[in-house]
Image (cartoon, grey):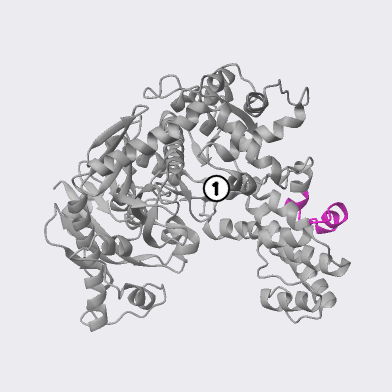
């Protein structure tokens, strides 16, 4: 026995989508209903555990046998559920290295991450049955009354479970020409160990934060009712109607629309109502409830990281609590505000702060606490700017990083040919250097500057095109990188072969365009072919998940390809650091920042040094990590 292909159907009183697999499987009423398995690619057998079937001893033993690889679609779920089934205590799980994930294999090739969608895209003969959702709603609640074994719907449920395993095996067979590199599997195992470890939350702080938020929301809603006369002023439809009665027309009340409205001329009452609406609409407050729903019995939230969550680049995404978009904290008295919330002192909070919901939003990060001692937190400094300078061999940028200079000042200095110092000579040019650095590295233009907030920073629209021109003139090697990469990718697709630029390979193979990074990892563009963009120029057309998460035809550009390469390389640098830290208690990583619980075996200087190590495949890349010690998580 070498490989098991597995699928489970389970029941629990915990909402899997909201709480995640770790909390779901921890419920007292959790149970496995069906266990479908194929041994070494043979026929699929379904064990009806709900009706008294027992797993054969050799199958049960194989579940923890290091020599047997267990395959599943989104295998974290199967691994966590089987750990519970086998009697593992909270916080202990089957070794991740025993499992490999079919979903991750598809993600590596930029295919859809849902079994249903990948079955459709790959035109599987044994795809996922579309009756599954109805059957899961019927049978997978903890209080569901199960029918007799020979019931027609139950037999359909068994077939549904069986079909998932058949789909897994067919996917693996079709993807076999393009295996996942062992180095990527090692990164997956590192990620799963972080998911297993989880991070502690301050439950008393979180509970009081929720209570305070709900009380404040009730108070604000009552005030809005008095001001507007509306039955439900939190209803967007009702509030838009009320605004129209005040002479204010708007298509939306989303964040951007609200900011635009509040910058205009408004009556005092309209401004007050819109400000209150902003306060009660803060989505970041909901993160407190998500934490509490997902917390395990030992006080830790687990399973927050989705490996290969971003298509093509392979960067991480978040689950349960969206760690990648945590609100920033900029309060000088963060400690005091946190103590007041933890104490539930709403009276003092009201006396001290005008916008309590904003305070609550800034405190979201602080809900994460170390089990004991402190967090050690370090962040890769200006990682994307360093990578693009390294790839392009833009010497003045490399020199600036080597000397530890402010890249925004140096960029402004190169653009305007004068010395620029932060809070010093020509300091007024630094904001132009900063917005240019953030917006223009991937072939962006005036639109990118506006999107990055150039106009809100006080720049005039007439200044923007000159900033674009000045930045490009100061960065000729980066501009050359865009067009060299674009030409190499186009030629690989046109001639259906392999090209190279800046050490990066572009390979067309059986409908895929692969970009082989200097790390050796590949980015995949499915169904790549030559097309024409809206400007009438040649471009690469491929298929992927678009902005609306639908599988659709997409097009790329030289700048977008470079963006993918740079972000994917930054991801590989992060994974290299995470692997080097695998023997230490890493609990979180947010973008290019790593959070470690201080267990006495790692110092902050050592953490920064490890994160500053250049991978062997990135000779000449200048890395630097800066860190801090924290008794709760915050943005340093």
Neighbor class of circle 1 (other Cα within 10 Å; few <14, some 14-19, many 20+) is: some
- Pick the quarter of the image with the C terminus: top right
Q: Residue at x 65, y 29 (%)?
A: 408
Q: Nearer the viewer, residue 560 or 38?
A: 560
- Name which quarter of the figure residue 603 lies in: top right
- Name which quarter of the figure residue 501 lies in: top left
- Residue 358 at least partly seen: yes
Q: Is 238 positioned to the left or the right of 150 in the image?
A: right
Question: Magenta: predominant secondary structure element?
Answer: helix
Residue marked by disc 1: 324
Q: Is 465 positioned to the left or the right of 15 in the image?
A: right
Task: Say above or below: 326 vs 428.
Answer: below
Q: Which residues are magenta?
A: 340-355
Q: Residue at x 51, y 40 (%)?
A: 443
How far from the left and from the top, in percent, is residue 413? 67, 24
How far from the left and from the top, in percent, is residue 334? 75, 43
Q: Nearer the viewer, residue 97 or 483?
A: 483
How far from the left and from the top, in percent, is residue 589? 51, 40
In reply to whether residue 350 is colored magenta, the answer given is yes
How far from the left and from the top, in percent, is residue 96? 33, 44
In reply to whether residue 79 is colored magenta, the answer given is no
Q: Residue at x 59, y 32 (%)?
A: 471
């Amino acid at each position: 026995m070498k490989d098991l292909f597995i699928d489970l159907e389970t029941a629990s009183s915990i909402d899997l989508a909201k709480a995640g697999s770790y909390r779901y499987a921890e419920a007292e009423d959790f149970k496995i209903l069906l266990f479908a398995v194929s041994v070494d690619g043979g026929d699929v057998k379904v064990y009806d555990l709900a009706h008294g079937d027992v797993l054969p001893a050799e199958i049960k033993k194989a579940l923890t046998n290091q020599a047997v690889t267990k395959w599943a679609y989104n295998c974290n779920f199967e691994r966590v559920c089987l750990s519970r089934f086998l009697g593992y205590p909270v916080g202990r799980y089957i070794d991740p290295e025993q499992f490999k994930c079919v979903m991750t294999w598809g993600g590596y090739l930029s295919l859809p991450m849902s079994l249903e969608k990948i079955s459709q895209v790959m035109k599987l003969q044994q795809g996922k049955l579309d009756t599954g959702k109805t059957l899961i709603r019927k049978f997978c609640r903890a209080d569901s009354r199960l029918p007799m074994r020979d019931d027609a719907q139950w037999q359909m449920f068994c077939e549904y479970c069986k079909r998932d395993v058949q789909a897994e095996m067919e996917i693996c067979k079709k993807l076999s020409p393009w295996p996942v590199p062992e180095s990527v599997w090692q990164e997956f195992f590192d990620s799963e160990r972080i998911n297993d470890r989880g991070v502690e939350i301050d439950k008393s702080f979180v509970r009081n934060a929720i209570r305070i938020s709900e009380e404040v929301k009730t108070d604000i809603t009552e005030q809005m009712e008095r001001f507007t006369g509306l039955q439900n002023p939190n209803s967007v439809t009702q509030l838009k109607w009320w605004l129209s009665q005040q002479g204010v027309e708007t298509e939306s009340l989303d964040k951007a629309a609200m900011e635009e409205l509040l910058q205009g001329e408004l009556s005092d009452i309209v401004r007050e109502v819109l400000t209150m609406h902003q306060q009660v609409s803060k989505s970041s407050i909901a993160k407190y409830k998500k934490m509490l729903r997902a917390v395990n019995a030992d006080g830790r939230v687990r399973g927050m990281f989705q490996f290969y969550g971003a298509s093509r680049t392979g960067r991480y995404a978040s689950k349960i609590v969206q760690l990648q978009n945590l609100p920033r904290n900029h309060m000088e008295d963060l400690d005091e505000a946190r103590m007041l919330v933890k104490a539930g002192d709403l009276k003092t909070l009201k006396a001290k702060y005008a916008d309590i919901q904003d305070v609550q939003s800034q405190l979201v990060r602080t809900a994460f606490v170390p089990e004991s001692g402190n967090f050690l937190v370090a962040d890769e400094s200006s990682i994307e700017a360093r990578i693009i300078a390294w790839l392009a061999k833009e010497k003045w940028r490399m020199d600036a990083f080597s000397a530890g200079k402010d890249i925004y000042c140096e960029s402004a200095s190169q653009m305007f040919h004068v010395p620029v110092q932060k809070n010093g000579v020509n300091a007024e040019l630094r904001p132009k250097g900063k917005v240019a650095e953030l917006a223009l590295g991937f072939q962006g233009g005036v639109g990118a500057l506006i999107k990055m907030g150039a106009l809100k920073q006080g720049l005039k629209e007439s200044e923007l095109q000159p900033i674009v021109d000045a930045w490009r003139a100061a960065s000729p090697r980066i501009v050359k990188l865009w067009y060299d990469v674009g030409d190499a990718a186009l030629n690989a697709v046109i001639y259906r072969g392999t090209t190279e630029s800046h050490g990066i390979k572009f390979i067309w193979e059986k409908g895929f365009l692969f970009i082989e990074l200097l790390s050796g990892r590949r980015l995949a563009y499915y169904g790549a072919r030559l097309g024409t963009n809206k400007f009438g120029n040649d471009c690469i057309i491929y298929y992927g998940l678009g902005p609306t998460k639908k599988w659709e035809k997409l097009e790329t550009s030289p700048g977008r390809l470079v963006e993918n390469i740079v972000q994917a390389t930054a991801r590989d640098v992060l994974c290299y650091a995470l692997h080097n830290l695998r023997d230490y208690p890493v609990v979180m990583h947010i973008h290019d920042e790593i959070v470690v619980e201080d267990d006495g075996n790692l110092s902050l200087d050592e953490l920064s040094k490890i994160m500053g190590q250049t991978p062997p495949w990135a000779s000449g890349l200048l890395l630097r990590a800066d860190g801090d010690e924290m008794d709760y998580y915050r943005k340093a």
